[in-house]
Image (spheres, helix red, strand yellow):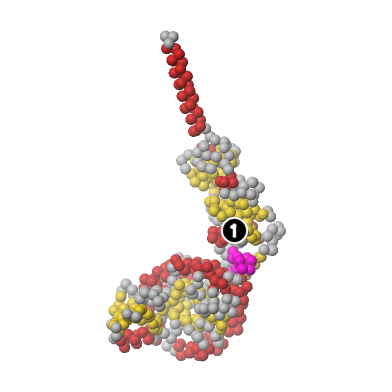
């Protein structure tokens, strides 16, 4: 017996040690940690840097606190909450186009509190949150007294349910009692639940922290309703009292203006002519003009408006350079307005093609600023666009549809010179172009442009090429060559081909039937009208089809 006692004691001691170890592991596993979170690492800022939360989501970009203001990256503002703040890097100038006026601010412009609206840091422009909120429908809460600074920007005004804590508890980096503590919330304080899970919820505290809190600590809810006092700018647009039936008149010389009378003889229903009068000539805002007073008077006597066209086709023009300077845009706009007044124009039509993506922000800013002058003068602003595609999305049709009066879809050049043979404008191509545009622009502003031309494609051992022919000339060519034209239901066009002395020639013919299908699309979608490229390419019979006001 005496020998057994020491053994039992040893076993007991071992059990105690084992039980103690299990207890220690249990405490280690389940006992809440009081370890404070590294807030600089958590919010990814330090010093005067300021973490940005957009709709309670931490952003990669950061701002900074200075002069009693939080400054936000202008590029971030453009991308996420207000694209209309335009920073002119060349002239160090901030430009904001309102419907009836344009606001400018430079690095010396200060708020009523004496703080600059704009700061430059590491070559990037930053705008004060105060300035941003003045022109943007947002809610802003800044927490800058803390060592780690934060700003919350909310773009919604939905009612929020804030929970009162029935018990105090720690808000942690992650769900789980071993996660570091961001802040200790006391009983009776309130949190906004952002995401509810089984045992934990992601919350935002009243003092601007986001983390995780145990659900058992949440109590009654209190609904907070927010009311915006922001007044959205109202863009007063100018529109015709009837559907638009526009024809472009290609004018390459002063003498070409005199052809308008003969070109109109066989037409019917046209209420707008857009002569190609203005062409940019350099990167300094200069342009050439072929405007003619007698031309305008002649059309006005016949109840036809004149929307003069401005193009960027010159090889001497790099639009991304020209439009990137505020002073150059202003010079160009002032010059155009002088022409408008001198020749009593009814509108302007922009035809900027081949833009580089880098030109996108400058181009839409030019349209914004030009729209202000057009409203002031009471004239129509219309903008020509390619059929929407990923590669040209930077033309920003949505913003065009707000600030311009009409957005024209150039529903052609599906197959173009130098490309693969095919139709200029198949039915499905035009249909898709209209549908995609209507996702961005109200139908009351959308004009679909149709082609009065087709292409004859030529292929031989020497290569491939094509000739653009007006409908009238294309019909004559097909008849002279004896081309058999066969209707293609899937394309909504006639197709024909021949072998002409070893050269294969193909044509997808635009004519009355194909144009009629395109006009049906315009009517079915209740668009603002039709535009036609170009006057003089068409036989008189086409005008029996091009009808929008009958």
Query: Where is residue 206 drawn, in percent x and y?
Result: 59, 45
Given residues 139 and 356, the one toward you in this image is 356
Which quarter of the picture shows residue 432? Answer: bottom left
Q: Which residue is mark 1?
A: 73
- Quick check: is 92 in the magenta stretch? yes
Query: Where is residue 341 drawn, in percent x and y?
Result: 60, 82
Outermost residue toward the top in this view: 1
* Residue 514 to residue 256: above or below: above
How crowded is the residue under tag 1: few (<14 C-alpha within 10 Å), some, or many (20+)?
many
Please say whether residue 339 is visible from this viewpoint: yes
Residue at 65% x, 60% y is 119
Residue at 55% x, 56% y is 155
The reply, left or right, for residue 326 in relation to residue 352 is right
* Residue 323 to residue 185: above or below: below
The reply, left or right, for residue 539 in relation to residue 106 is left
Query: Where is residue 195 drawn, in percent x and y?
Result: 49, 46
The residue segment tinted magenta is 85-100
**How many numbered callouts?**
1
Residue at 53% x, 43% y is 173
* Image quadrant in which the N terminus is located: top left
Query: Where is residue 269 drawn, in percent x and y?
Result: 44, 82
* Residue 119 to residue 317: above or below: above
């Amino acid at each position: 017996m005496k020998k057994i006692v020491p053994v039992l004691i040893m076993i007991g001691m071992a059990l105690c040690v084992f039980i103690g170890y299990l207890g220690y592991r249990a405490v280690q596993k389940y006992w809440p940690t009081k370890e404070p979170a590294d807030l600089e690492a958590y919010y990814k800022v330090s010093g005067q840097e300021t973490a940005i939360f957009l709709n309670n989501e931490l952003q990669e970009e950061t701002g900074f606190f200075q002069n009693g203001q939080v400054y936000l990256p202008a590029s971030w503002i453009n991308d996420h909450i207000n694209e209309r703040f335009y920073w002119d890097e060349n002239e160090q100038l901030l430009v904001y186009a309102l419907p009836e006026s344009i606001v400018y601010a430079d690095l010396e412009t200060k708020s009523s509190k004496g703080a600059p609206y704009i700061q430059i840091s590491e070559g990037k422009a930053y705008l004060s949150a105060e300035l941003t909120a003045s022109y943007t429908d947002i809610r802003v809460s800044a927490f800058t007294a803390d060592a780690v600074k934060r700003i919350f920007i909310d773009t919604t005004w939905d009612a929020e349910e804030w929970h009162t804590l029935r018990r105090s508890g720690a808000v942690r980096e992650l769900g789980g009692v071993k996660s570091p503590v961001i802040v200790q919330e006391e009983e009776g304080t309130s949190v906004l639940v952002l995401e509810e899970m089984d045992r934990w919820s992601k919350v935002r505290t009243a003092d601007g922290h986001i983390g995780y809190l145990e659900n058992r600590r949440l109590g009654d809810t209190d609904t907070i309703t927010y009311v915006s006092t922001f007044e959205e700018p109202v863009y007063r647009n100018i529109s015709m009292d009837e559907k638009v039936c526009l024809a472009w008149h290609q004018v390459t010389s002063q003498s070409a203006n005199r052809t308008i009378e003969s070109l109109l003889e066989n037409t019917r229903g046209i209420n707008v002519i857009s002569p190609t009068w203005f062409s940019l000539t350099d990167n300094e805002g200069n342009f050439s003009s072929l405007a003619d007073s007698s031309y305008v008077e002649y059309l006005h006597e016949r109840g036809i408006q004149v929307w003069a066209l401005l193009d960027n086709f010159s090889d001497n023009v790099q639009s991304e350079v020209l439009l990137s300077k505020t002073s150059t845009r202003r010079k160009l706009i002032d010059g155009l307005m002088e022409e408008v007044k001198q020749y009593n124009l009814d509108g302007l039509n922009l035809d900027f093609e081949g833009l580089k993506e880098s030109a996108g922000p400058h181009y839409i800013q030019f349209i914004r600023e030009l729209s202000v002058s057009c409203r002031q003068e009471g004239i129509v602003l219309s903008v020509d666009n390619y059929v929407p595609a990923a590669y040209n999305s930077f033309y920003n049709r949505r913003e065009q549809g707000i600030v311009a009066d009409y957005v024209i879809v150039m529903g052609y050049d599906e197959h173009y010179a130098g490309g693969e043979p095919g139709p200029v404008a198949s039915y499905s191509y035009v249909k898709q172009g209209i549908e995609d545009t209507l996702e961005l622009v109200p139908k009351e502003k959308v004009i679909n442009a149709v082609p009065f031309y087709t292409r004859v494609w030529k292929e031989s051992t020497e290569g491939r090429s094509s000739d653009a022919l007006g409908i009238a000339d294309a019909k004559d060519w097909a008849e002279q060559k004896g081309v058999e034209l066969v209707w293609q239901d899937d394309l909504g066009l006639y197709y024909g081909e021949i072998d002409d002395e070893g050269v294969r020639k193909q044509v997808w013919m635009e004519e009355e039937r194909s144009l009629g299908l395109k006009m049906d699309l315009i009517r079915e979608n209740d668009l603002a009208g039709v535009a036609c490229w170009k006057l003089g390419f068409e036989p008189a019979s086409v005008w029996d089809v091009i009808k929008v006001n009958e």
